[in-house]
């Protein structure tokens, strides 16, 4: 779906008339909360809902799915390693066959809540260390692709442009959706600046909003060296795990709307 | 479905032309195994597959569902408390609303594997302490009923005759299926003899097989006091967690077949 | 230790020259936080540190123990049911023998961090549903007592006056420490007003502080019906799981100090 | 301690008058069992007891420690990644600081049971993927060393000769104990043949026993290419997770005893 012709106009093939905003939701667990799910559901068009392996539990999934269905936000499966203590942020060397089943399990559990809410799971987006691993880890990337193929090959998959994950998914016939990050700096070749480097994460709400408008318009943003970089994502990822983050996400939405960009889920 | 007229013939309204054999499967976890799933899948007509909360994991669920689908054994959701260290055998005072979501989560996860295998979840049977609790605990019984109603009200539920669980399920319009236990002693009023009492569990394979044939024929078995007791279950539960148990289950199947009783899943 | 003569003066046998302030700490898990541990460690004299079964993890325990040792706050083991999803707030019908080992495990894990920090575990206080259960559940109360007896019979135990827990602990020769709650309403006979009833939890910081000063002075507070009630606890429990709660706890400390009551851990 | 002079005689510096036999124990969980702990405790001199992160639970730890103390088997902490579903056999990229605390937690929990049984934790041996990782992963190896240094620098550590783990432990002043595997093939340079290669695991009880006697005598065994290899371990690791394995372990013990080698724990 990346750079798909249907999204472009004649003047700029990278311009989108509409773009998706996605964010991680339902990342609490039991007594513990993380982020403001309700606030974010008024901002985004796609909700990556944690499925209980690295965050989330049944009660949270039920509540988020119910509200997402009411507000017509697309429900996606935020699948991850089985690692609650590590919040899915630590690479685990799971055998590929086991990883495939772990992903199917998570998608199935979420599907139940989505269906009960009158909706269904619309896409799959890996989380945390799994997201990062399958940028390059071919076996694990293939294992997650296999899970989606086994479960429902009509499900789009969301991820990083250039990743093994999206490449293998595409080769398997899945619909791939490329995302950009609203608040992350990019290298000149379009990869993310490592979080360990200064300047990796942007904090100025106005700058972040401007960059998102540029991305949606198919216009260049500044890479970390100040050069022009065209990203043209199908979806923009915003965060909501702090009060400031929700305000930034809201600013992105308002700026896109003001610029005439329709906010629309990529999967419907 | 208990004592349903369609199962009876003109001579004995409790006689069944066919009966279901159900057993707990997929009760290992990670490196640990419990019971012989493959052997049991050649014996039973309905497999109560553990869903990961008290036993079972994604890899085991995948394997059991794949094989159950191939051998045309009906897949049921063996739902339980979230208690791996206790194997679901300890009552947990979960709030009813949370219990409802926990059950939906488990059924959904299993559904994914059943669908991938070309089948689907055919029924729900609570496990262990949850099974026992909802014999009398009205709130928890209602919570599990609510889960099935929310998820799919066409799913039959399997349980103990006389339980709040089956009563409330019936009142909610669900199809209820009554089971008897092949190897358990019964009191004169048809309840189970407590496991804490001597003689609660039968061990003689021949006696167990004879009792099952009697149950299916609508004929009385001996209760713990020696009096006659007609059970007439829709399904008979056999165990498979020891090598001896598998042999007993096999003996039950052979005796029923020899007696002209068709073994058939109650849900298809 | 309740109403111990060494704490009384000649005018009022219930007056304490010193009192302990205890609070629950270290109740986050992995990525999730709960309460402001650092702020509370400047307020309380005894820290009930969660040990990983219902909350807390190794990294949190290390950090809390290190800081508690530096600030000379007594480290106590906040032991609970093994129930992270339920935060230990759901009764679990664990067999007593298993419960004994679960408690020993938790105390031992915390002891390691206390020792590494140059301190040691000074007392045991059950948490949540376990705290409530052993007010009346004799078998579970005896199981927790047994854990302390097996582990180290010199460890004091903290709990509710009148509970089976403190009674059995006393009978077993353990030092028992009675606590009162700073922000809870009491019935005329000195038991807690159920949280389900209106007025069970007090919210006015000034009133809470006044009541704590009265408790320490051995003077009556008002019970829920307005009558006088003398509690005379050895320790007062304050909460810290919200910003407002920390402010209330700080107010209690300041009021006690202003009234000339020394704040001192009951266990040293 | 490797090749320590006190273990050698004048004829062969690699000859040991005594050797330790160690094995993994307590690796069940809840309802699930693995191996025959009681049988192994009659064979080995050192028990690597699982501490609940990848296997084991409080009840199992209590039982194994009680029996180990009675039979005078040294209790060691079998520490691993926090990964019950993976049995600790999957590398997890835990941050070193978190790994240090995870190890301290496990050792502390086991210490409680060892003390209650009248003994104490005598050594630390990492398990599974952690064992393998810290052969070469310097940061994780240092993190585990740090845990032992923080907890009790008098505790010996058991591991693979040539590993970063033993090297860093030695540099930190810890006592290091080198082990060999009774049933594994070795390369000419003394490293283990990968389990993925044929012949990596030996199955012939007589051959395994002969090799162990040779190891203890400081005499060469055959490497995988047939050449002579002197291992001279301080401890020999035997397995017990299958009935056959227990018989092999028993055979090793009998052969060593028959050869005049005293079986003695390295840590007392």
Image (cartoon, coloured by chain):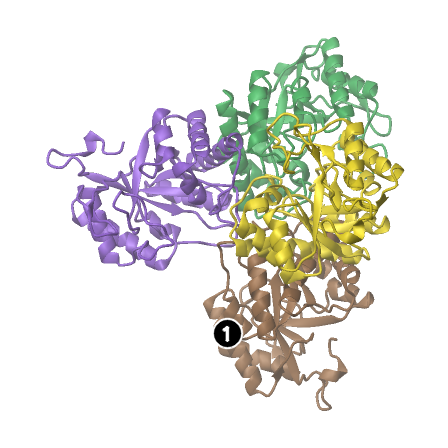
Chain colours: A green, B purple, C yellow, D brown
Which residue does the image show at 80% across and 33% down from the upper left?
A: C209
Closer to the camera in the image, B208 or D172: B208
- Residue D154: x percent and y percent? 77, 69
Quadrant of residue B72 in the image?
top left
Q: Given the image, what chain letter belongs to the residue carrying mark 1?
A: D
- Residue C77: x percent and y percent? 70, 51
User: What residue is shown with label 1?
Assistant: D248
Q: Tell whether C238 sits left or right of A64.
A: right
Closer to the camera in the image, B179 or B187: B187
Q: Quadrant of the C terminus of chain B?
A: top left
Determine whether B92 is above or below D192 in the image: above
Is residue A234 visible to the viewer in this orientation of the structure? no
Quadrant of residue A239 in the image?
top right
Which residue does the image show at 86% across and 29% down from the upper left?
A: A225
- Residue A77: x percent and y percent? 58, 30
Q: Tell whether D206 sits left or right of A127.
A: left
Is residue B216 visible to the viewer in this orientation of the structure? yes
Q: Quadrant of the N terminus of chain B?
A: top left
**For the residue carrying disc 1, how many other residues have a C-alpha within 10 Å: few (<14), some (14-19), or many (20+)?**
many
Asked which secondary structure carries label 1, the reply is helix
Determine whether D198 is above or below B189 in the image: below
Q: Residue furthest bottom?
A: D11
Q: Tell whether A194 sits left or right of A116.
A: right
Determine whether C162 is above or below A126 in the image: below
Q: Residue furthest front?
A: C11
Closer to the camera in the image, A188 or A149: A149
Determine whether A92 is above or below B177 in the image: below
- Residue D89: x percent and y percent? 60, 55
């Amino acid at each position: 779906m990346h750079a798909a012709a249907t999204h472009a106009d004649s003047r700029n093939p990278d311009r989108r008339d509409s773009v998706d905003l996605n964010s991680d939701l339902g990342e609490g667990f039991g007594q513990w909360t993380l982020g403001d799910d309700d606030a974010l559901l008024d901002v985004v068009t796609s909700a990556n809902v944690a499925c209980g392996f690295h965050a989330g539990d049944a009660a949270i999934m039920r509540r988020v799915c119910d509200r997402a269905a009411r507000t017509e936000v697309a429900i996606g499966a935020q699948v991850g390693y089985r690692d609650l203590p590590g919040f899915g942020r630590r690479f685990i060397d799971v055998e590929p066959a086991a990883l495939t089943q772990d992903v199917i399990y998570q998608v199935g559990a979420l599907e139940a809540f989505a269906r009960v809410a009158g909706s269904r799971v619309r896409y799959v987006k890996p989380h945390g260390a799994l997201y990062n691993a399958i940028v390059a880890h071919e076996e694990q990337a293939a294992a997650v692709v296999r899970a989606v193929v086994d479960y429902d090959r009509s499900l789009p998959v969301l991820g990083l442009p250039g990743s093994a994950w999206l490449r293998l998914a595409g080769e398997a016939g899945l619909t791939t959706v490329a995302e950009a990050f609203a608040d992350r700096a990019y290298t000149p070749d379009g990869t993310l600046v490592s979080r360990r480097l200064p300047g990796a994460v942007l904090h100025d709400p106005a700058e972040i909003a401007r960059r998102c408008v540029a991305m949606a318009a198919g216009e260049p943003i500044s890479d970390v060296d100040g050069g022009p970089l065209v990203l043209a994502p199908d979806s923009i990822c915003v965060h909501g795990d702090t009060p400031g983050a929700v305000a930034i996400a809201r600013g992105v939405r308002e700026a896109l709307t003001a610029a005439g960009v329709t906010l629309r889920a990529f999967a419907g």
